[in-house]
Amino acid sequence: MPEIQNPPCIVPRCSPSGRPRSADNGRLICRVCTTRLRRDLQITPMLMTWLAHHKAPGQGGGDKVTGSRETTAPARLDVLSMLNDGATPIHGDDDDQVGPPSIPSTVKNWAWLVAEMRGLVYPERATVDDLAAWLGRHLDWATGQPWIEDMIGEVAALRRWAHRLAPWAVHVQDLVGPCLSCKKRTLIRVAGERYIECDPREEVGGCGDLWTYEEYEDHVSALVNARKRTNRKRS
């Protein structure tokens, strides 16, 4: 009996190779896209905290606005735009977005849609932390919806814009184990994040797969134990 092939992931260019990965069973997206969305949701509270420490000029660019009489230091409009609920992203003449999105508004909009479609009570008083966790609990359902590609793009944009406005340190670690998928030693971990990613940049050549740090540690332990067994057989 021939093996049933899952359809391709609906996210364009979900793989650096340009060939889409196969979608998971019951989902419209692949495992990697699901994991990346889970990471991007989990990181939103940390983005809020990080940007709150960069409201004054110092790191990154952006327009500045003078504060009130009590607050003489200028503030960064681009950072405030990401922190404030209801802030509208700036669009250029060609309607392309040229300004950062609002983290609270983005998370609230997706939580409202999920609640509406699932017949749930929308958590009105929930914080960004609460809503990110709430969306994470409904992720398995959301990955089977036709709008999941839009959700992935909008949530990923929060992390991308925040890192652009106030860059985080990217640690290229001297890791023992290679990538679980492509076997290349191109793994990176962004400071403060739980996930390890195979660097997909063209000059590096990684596959873009990612896992939690705990999953990576299990992988390393398995490699070390396998090497020990091999050495014992040889001795």
Image (cartoon, rainbow, N blue to C red):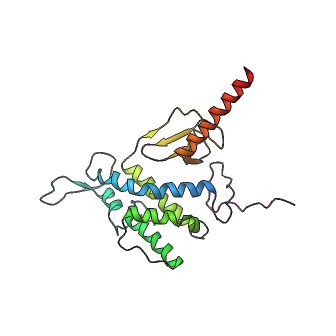
Residue found at the very far right of the displayed protein: 1
Q: Residue at x 66, y 52 (%)?
A: 18
- Based on the displayed image, in which of its 4 quarters is residue 91 positioned? bottom left
* For residue 17, above or below residue 77: above
- Based on the displayed image, in which of its 4 quarters is residue 125 positioned? bottom left
On screen, residue 6 versus residue 217, left or right, reads: right
From the viewer's side, name the closer residue of 100 and 155. 155
Residue 184 coordinates in the image, percent (x, y): 63, 37
Q: What span is colored magenta in the figure?
A: 1-24
Q: Can residue 101 be seen in this view?
A: no
| Quadrant location, the N terminus | bottom right
On screen, residue 35 versus residue 82, left or right, reads: right
On screen, residue 142 versus residue 106, left or right, reads: right
Q: Main secondary structure of the magenta part?
A: loop
On screen, residue 19 versus residue 110, left or right, reads: right
Residue 187 coordinates in the image, percent (x, y): 55, 39
Q: Residue at x 36, y 48 (%)?
A: 166
Q: Which residue is drawn at 56% across and 68% down?
A: 142
